[in-house]
Image (cartoon, grey):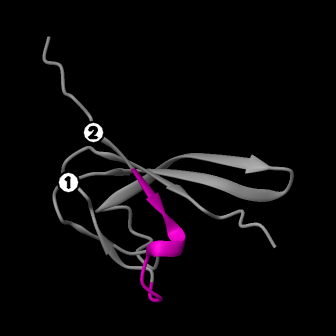
Amino acid sequence: MKQTHQATFRVNITQIEEDGDFPCPKCGATISPDDETETVYEIVDTKMKRQNLEELVILCKRCESRIRFVGFLQPI
C-alpha cells in the first residue's frame, strides 16, 4: 500500500494580491478563486464562526498539498 505525505500550508488571505491568484506553496500551480472547474484545486473543508467564514481548506490537485486559508475574520 502506497502512502503519500501531504504537506499542509497556512495562508493568510490578507497577504494575497488583490486579484486573488496565488501560486501553490509547494508546486507553484496557479490557484485562482475565479477557477470554478476544479481542475487545479478542490475545496475540501470550510469552517464557520456563526454565519461568517473562518477558514477554508483546499487541496492542490497537482501536488496534493492542503492549503488552509485563514484571516477571513479580522478584528474591527
Q: Nearer the viewer, residue 34 or 50?
A: 50
The residue wearing badge 1 is: 26
Tally the numbered discs. Answer: 2
Q: Residues within 10 Å of mark 2 (few under 14, many from 20)?
A: few
Q: Is residue 35 left or right of residue 28?
A: right
The x, y position of residue 10, in whole percent, is 42, 51
Q: Is residue 60 left or right of residue 2?
A: right
Amino acid type, mark 2:
Ala
| Vertical arrangement, residue 62 with respect to residue 31, above or below | above
| Vertical arrangement, residue 18 with respect to residue 34, above or below | below
Which region shows up in magenta? 10-19
Question: Residue 16 shows which numbered tag?
Answer: none
The residue wearing badge 2 is: 7
Cα distance in 3D space between marks 2 and 1: 8 Å
The x, y position of residue 11, in whole percent, is 43, 59
Q: Does the segment drawn in magenta span residue 9? A: no
Q: Are marks 2 and 1 in contact (CB under 8 Å)?
A: yes
Name the residue at 26% across, 51% down: 61
The x, y position of residue 60, in whole percent, is 30, 53
The x, y position of residue 26, in whole percent, is 20, 54
Q: Nearer the viewer, residue 39 or 7?
A: 7
* Of pointers 2 and 1, the one earlier in the residue sequence: 2
Name the residue at 72% across, 62% down: 73
Q: Does the segment drawn in magenta span residue 12? A: yes
The answer to which image quadrant residue 29 occupies is bottom left
Q: Is residue 29 left or right of residue 10?
A: left
Secondary structure of the residue carrying tag 2 is loop
Name the residue at 43% across, 76% down: 16
Quadrant location of the C terminus?
A: bottom right
